[in-house]
Image: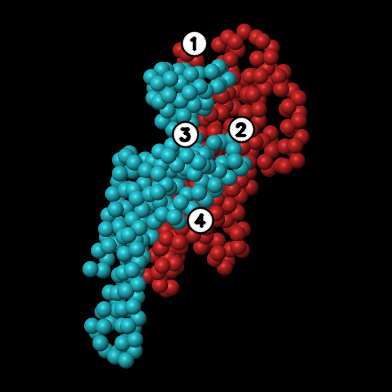
Amino acid sequence: MSIDIDDILAELDRDTTAVEQNASSYPDQSDRTQGNDVSQIRPADKAVDPVAPTQFNKIDDYQKLITHWKNERMSPELLPYPHHLMTRTLIRIQERIELIETLSMGYLEDNQELTVDSKLPLLCMEAELERLKFLVRSFIRCRLSKIDKYSIYLRQQSELPNNAGLSRLDLLMSKEEVKYHMKHSDILLKLFNNAVLKHLPEELQAVNDTEGSISMIDEPDWNKTVFILVCGGVVDESGIDSKLTTDDDGKHCYSVIIEDLNEEIYLLIGAVYVIRYSVIRDLMTEGRVVLI
Amino acid sequence: MYGDLANKLILEAKRTQQLSQAGFNKQQLPVYQDELVRGILKEVGSLKKNVDYLREQQLTDQDNKVAQCQYVVAMLSMERNKRCLLAYQKMRSEMLDSMVWDNNGMEFSSAISNHPNLSSFDSSVLSHAEQEYLKEYAQLLTELKSGELSEIDLTGMLQPPSDVFIDVRVLKDAGQIETEYGVFNLIKDSQFFVRQSDVERLIQQGYLQKI
């Protein structure tokens, strides 16, 4: 039995979007066993437009999440949180868990013979669910570690006068993350205060001192070298990519300027480069290049 | 000499870090160096007195190069001591953080307070402020886990899952567990074919080993 399953799962491994295909390849089953549940869930979703999972392509969303995850893992700074995408993903995970539960309950109630064949779709769904959960978990954990690392920096950024209070943090992080960030830096400061700072002379009690010999605030390393893949494919309303130029050979590329060397270089579409993060930061946030 | 004590503290911190990186001491922090820390704080106090005295002198005697130099050196020593103290504390707090993550938040801190003898972790190695911090951080993590992201299980495995079902070997007796697929009696050295998500926590706690 185990050999069979391994073979089939190995095949699934090659296809990263299998979770979405599962859903479409077994429509009868899910409709039969879960008809009522589906009709209950859907109307609620339609009320909130940008987060309604039904209105967005599942495969696209999955790919986008993977891109976000890779960018987040490789970039030195904390990237903006993809609010809508994550909401949709979480709703889908929820639905999938319910579906799997109903399916396995259904099998038990019907008292059917539990053969490998009848369990296989269920097994595939569970495998894919675990993978998706891993992706989200890894993404969030990566973000949380960055939030911890740049805690004071983030706090300071949000207090700059040209940002209206917390609004910027709200965009950058999810609600839960903001809460975590605030709470954690609070208790960490309390620890520092109790253990060290309150025993020091007054002029040495700050933790965000930049005047002294060494700045106390950890800033992201903007000059970290990163691997990038130039993917292009971002177009505006008129259907053309305004940043796209052509190099001497007539190939499509983006031109960027490395300020330290005062040198202009061309990034060809489809090519891989190793480059300083600060140089391609804008192209990355626009989705024209991805980190790998 | 000024700064010697702080140097000791930093060496201690570095040793701790290397030990934990090498995989020893995963669950155990070395004892909080209360005496060292207090010694350094005392040093800062006496430096502070020097600085005040030197500053007063400078007001009367502007051109005394020696006094100016003394002043700068004393200031820098104070700053360095502060940096060392904070670095030590930060390192320990980060290790506490990772311990909380590894032990699934609240379960950990309640284990400490309820069974101080049973748990492998000895809370006497922590300073009072650290114990408080540990408790609050565990609380924070539990809140985070039970919020919007409760389905994800944030403290779960960080390696990508390969199979839904895995073979595990039991390293320590863990009693019975119940799963959808029946009851397993986890006796040392036996092997089972189980669903990964059912036993993940036991693997992390060191009861089971994936094979």
Amino acid residing under circle 2 = Ile
Crowdedness near tag 3: few (<14), some (14–19) or many (≥20) residues, C-alpha within 10 Å: some
Instruction: Give the foreground label among 3 and 2.
Output: 3
Subunit that carries the residue with mark 4? A
| Residue A1 - label | 1
Q: Which residue is mark 4?
A: A187
Q: Which residue is mark 2?
A: A93
Crowdedness near tag 2: few (<14), some (14–19) or many (≥20) residues, C-alpha within 10 Å: some
Calculate the distance from the C-alpha at mark 1 to the C-alpha at mark 2.
28 Å
- Residue sitting farthest toward the bottom: B60
Calculate the distance from the C-alpha at mark 1 to the C-alpha at mark 4.
52 Å
Q: Residue at x 30, y 57 (%)?
A: B9
Across and down, in percent, residue A8 comes to 50, 16
Q: Are marks 2 and 4 on the same chain?
A: yes
Colour in which chain A is drawn: red
Across and down, in percent, residue B174 comes to 46, 25
Relative to A119, say whether B94 is above or below: below
| Residue B102 - label | none
User: Chain in cyan?
Assistant: B
Coloring basis for residues: by chain
Amino acid residing under circle 3 = Met
Crowdedness near tag 4: few (<14), some (14–19) or many (≥20) residues, C-alpha within 10 Å: some
In the rendered image, is residue A210 in sight? no
Relative to B165, say whether A192 is above or below: below
Q: Which residue is mark 3?
A: B157
Among numbered discs 1 and 2, the one appearing first in the sequence: 1
Across and down, in percent, residue B49 comes to 33, 78
Calculate the distance from the C-alpha at mark 3 to the C-alpha at mark 1.
26 Å
Relative to A35, say whether B21 is above or below: below
Q: Are marks 4 and 3 in contact (CB under 8 Å)?
A: no
Subunit that carries the residue with mark 2? A
